[in-house]
Image (cartoon, rainbow, N blue to C red):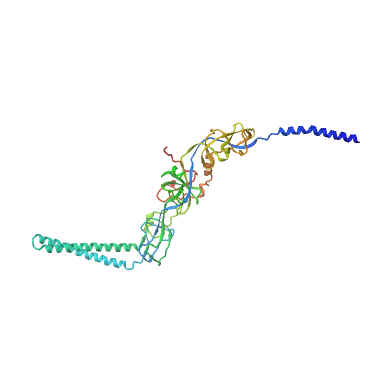
Amino acid sequence: MRNILLLSLSALWLVAGCGGPSKKGKKDDFVLPPQLVKAMTVQTETYVPLIHAMGQALPLREVTLSVEQPGKLQFLPAEVGETVFERRPLARVRSLGLWSRKNQAAAQVQEIQNSLTQAESDYKKVKELYDRGAVTNRDLETADLLFKTRKTQLTAANAGMSQLDETLYGTGLYAPFTGEISAKFQEVGNYVNMGTPLYRIVDLTTIRMIVGISELDIKFISQNDTVWITPLAYPDRGIRGTIHSISPAQDPQLGAFPVEIRFPNVLKVPLPDMKNMENGHAPVQRKWWILSGMTLRAKISKKPVTGVFVPAEALVERLGKMWVFSVPATTNHETAGPAEMKEVTLGRTYEGWYEVTSGLSPGTRVVIAGNTKLRDKASVRVQMVETGINKELVDAQTAASPDQASVPTQDATPATGTTPATGLTPATGTPPVKERKP
């Protein structure tokens, strides 16, 4: 029995000794499978960088109206939202006997005018008699003095008459231009002083927009450049505007240069003949697409840039330098190949994409995902992705615009005789590129 136990232990020891080295050899021969990465083929592309800005819609003109004379309001016909025409009476305060004073002044002017006519006739007669020696020089001087006195009196009377006319005009209020009433501050019966606000009137035929442009971008724009505008209220509509003015001084509050953009507004519903409405008394309300205070997004195109671009995800920083991993054209989802590190020099950045000025040539396959832990010459399998700076930035903006049918435009007509093409048009995501002289 004892011999059998010893033989069993010896056999186990031999088996353990023989199996140990073979397992160690298998562990040394283990190799990691190729990593699956995503890659793109870089090409030479022409990209139009955009300057993005946001601002509020402002009317072309906006004034607060008030009477020039104090008094009790007797006439205040217009209401908020109503269209008023140029020179239309909007308010009047009690004249407090000004018309009686004007009539008296008119009578006085007429009386002095008659006296002046008589004095002029007398002077001419005395002058004829003086020339024949029938009267003395003193008589001629007296007639001349009376004639000049009447002329001075008439000038003073006319000045008083003009002052009364101005005072009477100041008791009324008239529309300085055709526009919409945006605010009404008083009611009939209220007593107002000189300068008390009565109405605010806005001109919406043309919309202004003031945006702040940084000092890095201000050099890329100029007056009359085309701007693509998208209202926040109508994200599927695009408006073509132009740069009206560029401030030469930076606004300390904005930290940027104020740039004014203008574009023609459009009526939702066409109106009848304006002349007929102007002569009538029925209230008129024009329905505009863009209202004062609406939020607007603007895109201004810079000078086109041609080069090789890679996304930020393709870049790896090691040893203070920027690298990308390139893979051979023979690699694919099934066939593995080595990923080679290439040092690159970067230029400008455009919304997450970098311009590569050296180190890459068109047609190179560059890893854009799964490269964070890669090593040089590491074996990888590749899943190709069709992408590029224009596809990611320009096409994505176009695809983000909803269908143009979501906002009715068949009844939209320009307010100032412009063609509908200059008003609201379907948004395309990218403004037209203006060719610049080198």
Q: Is residue 122 visible?
A: no
Give the left or right position of residue 192, taking residue 133 as reference.
Answer: right
Q: Residue at x 22, y 66 (%)?
A: 111
Against 352, residue 56 (above or below) is: below
Q: Is residue 226 visible?
A: yes
> Given the current orientation, which residue lies at the most extreme right position?
1
* Spot occupied by residue 188 in the image (x, y as percentages of width and height): 40, 66
* Spot occupied by residue 137 in the image (x, y as percentages of width and height): 11, 62
For the image, the number of numbered tags is 0
Against 69, residue 214 (above or below) is: above
* Spot occupied by residue 163 in the image (x, y as percentages of width and height): 29, 62
Q: Residue at x 80, y 34 (%)?
A: 16
Give the left or right position of residue 372, taking residue 262 as reference.
Answer: right
State the residue in front, 350 or 120: 350
State the residue in front, 407 or 12: 12
State the residue in front, 328 or 391: 328
State the residue in front, 81 or 173: 173
Quarter of image, res 318 = top right
Quarter of image, res 24 = top right
Quarter of the C terminus within the rendering: top left
> Given the current orientation, which residue lies at the most extreme left position?
133
Against 3, residue 286 (above or below) is: below
Quarter of the N terminus within the rendering: top right
Q: Residue at x 24, y 66 (%)?
A: 108
* Spot occupied by residue 82 in the image (x, y as percentages of width and height): 42, 58
Against 55, residue 26 (above or below) is: above
